[in-house]
Image (tube, helix red, strand yellow):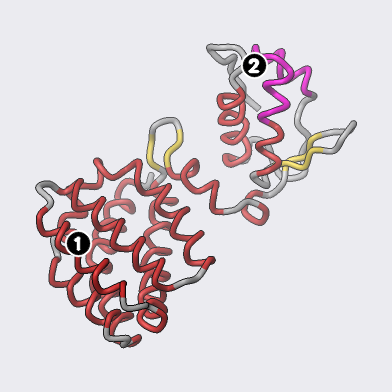
Amino acid sequence: MVLKPVERRLVPENVFDQLLGEVVDGELAPGSSLPSERRLAEVLGVSRPAVREALQRLSQAGLVDVRHGGSTTVRDFRTSAGLDLLPRLLVRDGELDPAVGRSILQARQAIAPGVAAQAAQTAGPHVARTLRAIVADLESATDSEARQHAALRFWDAVVDAADSIVFRLLFNSLRSAYEPAIAALGPMMEAEVDNLEGYRGLTEAIVSGDRSAALSAADDLLRPATEALGRLLTALDP
């Protein structure tokens, strides 16, 4: 285990990030015990309350099992953590993890058409006005970054129309991972966010209540960028 003193005291966020990296990288293997609070505080140069708060956050994230009066044991994050961990896995130490990026793209391609199909079945009359207004915003946006934000609002409205708490929480997690990378992804997302006919076609499929057409339109809209970004991330993966 390689831990570094943090630059400022009382910074549980920094402690959390360092321990998260050790767990995700496998330096702290599932089943292993962390050093005591006192020892971690000494190594990191922070107070014990800062370490305690970081450990509580790790526990809430499903990364460790904190036993009162006993040791803190590392859990297997692949079987215990939730989607709230995704943004931290995607970008670590300022660098994008290509494998995590591919996983997000695969999840998007697998889930979004089903969300669109569900929206076609459950959408109320107000959805047509909402989706058409967002497509108008897409058309009037002056740059790729603005169109990406409009596209996120479009999918946010589709998720609302699907009326599923599971889809909503999945979308929230994927959006949290994606939004910080919007500026960098601009050139690669242009083909998708510029596809106004694709958004119009998906809108009308949802509005008409045609599940099959909505599923197909969503798949057609997302697949080109998904495949292009997937190839790029594969090339970046060492």
Near mark 1 (Cα within 10 A), the count class, few <14, some 14-19 or many ≥20, is: many
Percent position of residue 186, x then y: 20, 47
Which amino acid, by three-letter code, is at mark 1?
Glu
* Magenta-drawn stretch, dominant element (helix, strand or loop): helix
Percent position of residue 193, x then y: 19, 59
Q: Establish if 70 lies above or below 105.
A: above
- Residue placed under numbered mark 2 in the picture: 44
Which residue appears at 85% of the width and 38% of the height? 67
Question: In the image, is residue 50 part of the stretch drawn in magenta?
Answer: yes
Percent position of residue 28, x then y: 68, 36
Q: Establish if 70 lies above or below 205.
A: above
Q: Residue furthest right?
A: 69
User: Helix, strand or loop at disc 2?
Assistant: helix
Q: Quadrant of residue 70?
A: top right
Which residue appears at 68% of the width and 47% of the height? 62
Percent position of residue 216, x then y: 29, 81
What residue range appears in magenta? 37-54
Which residue appears at 12% of the width and 46% of the height? 143
Say the numbered circle drawn on residue 192: 1
For the N terminus, the image quarter is: top right
Q: Residue furthest front?
A: 126
With 216 as the anchor, is 143 left or right in this view?
A: left
